[in-house]
Amino acid sequence: MRGRRIPALLLGFMLAWTLSAAPAEGVTLRTVSCFAGDDSAAGAYVEILNRYESETGNTVRDTSSTSSEAWKSSVLNDFAAGNEPDILFFFAAGADSAPLLSRVVPLDEINREYPEITLAENDALREADGKIYAVPVRGYWEGLYVHTDLFEKYGAPLPENWDSLLEAIRIFRENGIIPIAVSLSDIPHYLAEMALLACAGKEEQQARPRSLQEVPASWFEAMRVIRELTEAGAFAGNAAATYESASTAQFLSKEAAMQFDGSWLTSSIPPSAMDTVAVYPMPKRDGNGSSDCYIGGVSMGFYLTRRSWNSGRRDAAVRLLAELTGPESLQSLGNLSLSGRLRASADRMREGRNMVSPLQDAMNKNAREVWLLECIPAVAAGTMTAEQCWEKVMALLPFGE
């Protein structure tokens, strides 16, 4: 995986650096990302690190894992303990990144010291303090994935509106197919966000209430939607106890007909199946077709930590950051290889719709975890009402005082 070379222009810049900007021999760097597991870019990420090692003589110790709440917490805990890596690929411009900002370096500061590399500053990742700390790699979107061949086989209507979604759920349930694959125990995120889109328009979805009294009525209705889907038999009987890896495996093996997920799921879909998989916008609960919004944006990027910047590893780390975010690397890390029906449906899902960021990204960590990992499973099970859910979340001041 060391066969590719960096672009000649970038190599020229590197060779032209002053002695003070040249990485020291034998430096060991630590990196953390979520380019791991089934992510389509995991191999490209490892290739970039291997290439960097072979060209510099430096060593990279990478501890990447697939993205999850546990992974997020481990990253934040390392920062809190002063054990952060040199280079980090993590969430940006939201509640997740806020605890990191004092311990990572703004891009304008890096660019002033190393004008040879000119890291791109994307306004989509500008933080509340007005600075940009992360170099983005790829955008994303979320939607309702379906196996169109299963719909054809069982005569189920495609989920273009609420009634057709419920009818498809009924048909698949009667034929022993899990209608919608989901894990309520660790990744109920997509279900929660899609339930909001089923009930809330753009303005309400982007509301940031400061008190329970300010919570939009559509947010309460969205929680009732989750209970309604559960009662309709939309999910597997063990949805509250299984893990996201297992529920995704059910979808990919066609034990399940549908799944709420992000664009990253496409990396697990083989090219041969891209003509029988499609992605749809969320149907509206009021029966008026589908939502005029979709979840999407640029949420993650590469950071250089202040700890590395203030050490003898600075030059080596900056060079690695330049390698990871150069044009060739961005293409290999950010490319989604879609084809056939899946590509066409993904384009249609976004065309003419408003892109909105996930509500969870605006919440503080405690409130987000309570909403997703405590409230959503309880609401689905019928042991917590929509009112109790938002009362519990809003008590944690999810959007600040």
Image: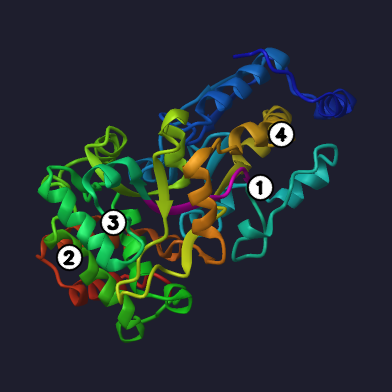
Seen in the picture, residue 260 relative to 274 is either above or below; the reply is below
Q: Position of residue 109 (x, y in %)?
A: 75, 49
Q: Is residue 311 visible?
A: no
- Say which element carries label 1: loop
Q: Residue at x 83, y 28 (%)?
A: 20
Q: Give the Cα separation between the discs numbered 4 and 1.
A: 11 Å
Residue 140 magenta = yes
Asked if marks 4 and 1 touch (Cβ < 8 Å), the reply is: no
For the residue pair 55 and 38, the one nearer the viewer reads as: 38
Query: Which residue is labeled 3 in the image?
Result: 157
Type of amino acid at the residue the image marks with label 4: Val
Q: Which residues are magenta?
A: 135-144
Q: Nearer the viewer, mark 3 or mark 1?
A: 3
Label 4 packing within 10 angstroms: few (<14), some (14-19), many (20+):
many
Q: Residue at x 22, y 51 (%)?
A: 184
Seen in the picture, residue 73 relative to 318 is either above or below; the reply is below
Query: Which residue is labeled 1 in the image?
Result: 105
Q: Name the image quarter holding residue 389.
A: bottom left
Q: Nearer the viewer, mark 2 or mark 1?
A: 2
